[in-house]
Image (tube, grey):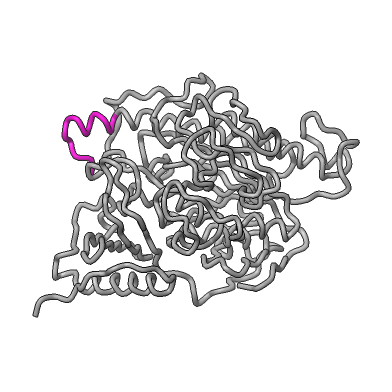
Amino acid sequence: MSDRLTLRTPRPPNVLWVFGDQHRAHATSYRGDRNVFTPNIDNLAREGMRFDAAVAGAPWCTPFRGALLTGRYPHQTGVTRTPSPLPPDIPTVAHAFDAAGYHTAYVGKWHLDGGNFPTHHVPPERRGGFRYWMGYENNNNQHECYVHGTDAEAPQRLPGYETDALSDLLIEHLRRHVGATRTGAEAVGGVEGLSPATAGPEYRPFFAVLSVQPPHGPNVTPTNPASGARRIHPADLELRRNVPLIPGLERRARFDLVGYYAMIENLDYNIGRIRTALTGMGVDRDTYVVFFSDHGDMMGSHGQFGKSTPWEEAIRVPFIVHRAGGDYNMRVGGIDAPLNHVDIAPTSLGLCGIDAPEGMVGYDYSAHCIRLDAPEYHGDSQPDAEPRSAYLQQIPPKLHRHTTSQPWRGVVTRDGWKYACTPGSDWMLFDTANDPCEQANYVFDAAFQEQKERCHGLLTEWIASTGDRFALPDIALPA
């Protein structure tokens, strides 16, 4: 990392983050879930670079988002629970892009100002440094969503379903930005309602974010008939094999999953709309679309619901980097790197040839995405430092029903081992590469003591290197 921002290429591309809330990695058709159809996400995966081992190192809305924007772990920013505010003096990825000459825009759910209700007003100085910001603090009613910000500080009710309306807001803002900062008829071609007379003297690249609440509960199906969501009957769902077939629990899982999958298909539909709009603006080949989620959802697996637990369904998230044109400018395929929340900001900056600013502790994985002959390729800046594991945290205890009520720390390795502890006690050791549903816990099996000690050592290193504090257990076998 550098103590100053360095632009490595004179014409960097755009970056667009698109992410939903509580969308677990398994709930996509490209990952084999037969309950859901996600053709647009599947196309991103087919034509882009998949990080199939990506994790939410803090699987809770606000802590993840604080780490996402700052490239720092939750305990390093103080953003450790939901809700809690992001200190306005901590630089974010938006500041870094802005310093490199980018236009920055954020649309949708924020949940970083210490509020937890729809009418909470986020003032301009606490919007993470984004030049354009239209969003809301938190909302759990996808059919009645209010936003405020740059265009209107008074709350404005969105017309229609949240994901559809927020996608409209993003598309319209990008159209205005692209049309106003390009010159000539050729430059603004395809931007509806814009003419060369409205274009400015030079094009300014953008870093934009679309953050939507769905598929976070309540698990209610979108009612717009054009939403892209199919009708799914609860009895037809295939449950993950780690969902206990206890009548009340199974019934809840099935009914929750119907709305959950419908919201995912609606998000997929809007990803298709956004890609079409980028093509219409003429910037599709100039734009990296980065698709991910802030964490997953248990949905009945191991008898739990929600997040804030180290089980696979809560920590594994989709993560795809895509740029139109396929292998014209980026690598295509999949990688098993344990990309974590703190890595997303430096990786996104790296896609544009921008050095991560001092203070971002995450790893820049962009070298895995960009072709060697692409102008923004700058090599792997930390070839010997690529993480072989990812650090997991639940810092304060969370007392929601049907989830884990203890603070915990954990680690996942690149070869698929997971180890987690509660204070002073070891809890789980799984070989997720061969046991993805985590049905064989080896934490007290002496035959796996070597793996346990390896993971315990990695966890000890993560706690020390990040400046965290946690009481680890003594795992030595009895004499």
Please state which of residues 253 and 109 is positioned toward the viewer in this rendering: 109
Name the residue located 45 percent from the left edge and 69 percent from the top edge: 387
- For residue 359, above or below residue 394: below
- For residue 7, above or below residue 117: below
Name the residue located 41 percent from the left edge and 26 percent from the top edge: 220
Name the residue located 59 percent from the left edge and 26 percent from the top edge: 158
Please state which of residues 441 and 28 is positioned toward the viewer in this rendering: 441
Horizontal side of 434 relative to 307 (left or right) equals left
Image quarter in which the C terminus is found:
bottom left
- Picture mark count: 0
Quadrant housing residue 477: bottom left
Which span of residues is magenta-colored? 242-254
Quadrant housing residue 11: bottom right
Name the residue located 26 percent from the left edge and 50 percent from the top edge: 405
Horizontal side of 398 relative to 199 (left or right) equals left
- For residue 419, above or below residue 251: below
Q: Residue 235 placed where, x, y %?
A: 27, 25
Q: Residue furthest right?
A: 197
Horizontal side of 359 relative to 151 (left or right) equals left
| Magenta stretch holds residue 247 | yes
| Magenta stretch holds residue 104 | no
Image quarter in which the N terminus is found:
bottom right
Q: Is residue 335 visible?
A: no
Q: Is residue 129 visible?
A: yes
Q: Residue 473 placed where, x, y %?
A: 22, 70
Q: Residue furthest left?
A: 479
Q: Residue 20 placed where, x, y %?
A: 49, 41
Determine the main secondary structure of the stretch shown in magenta. Answer: helix
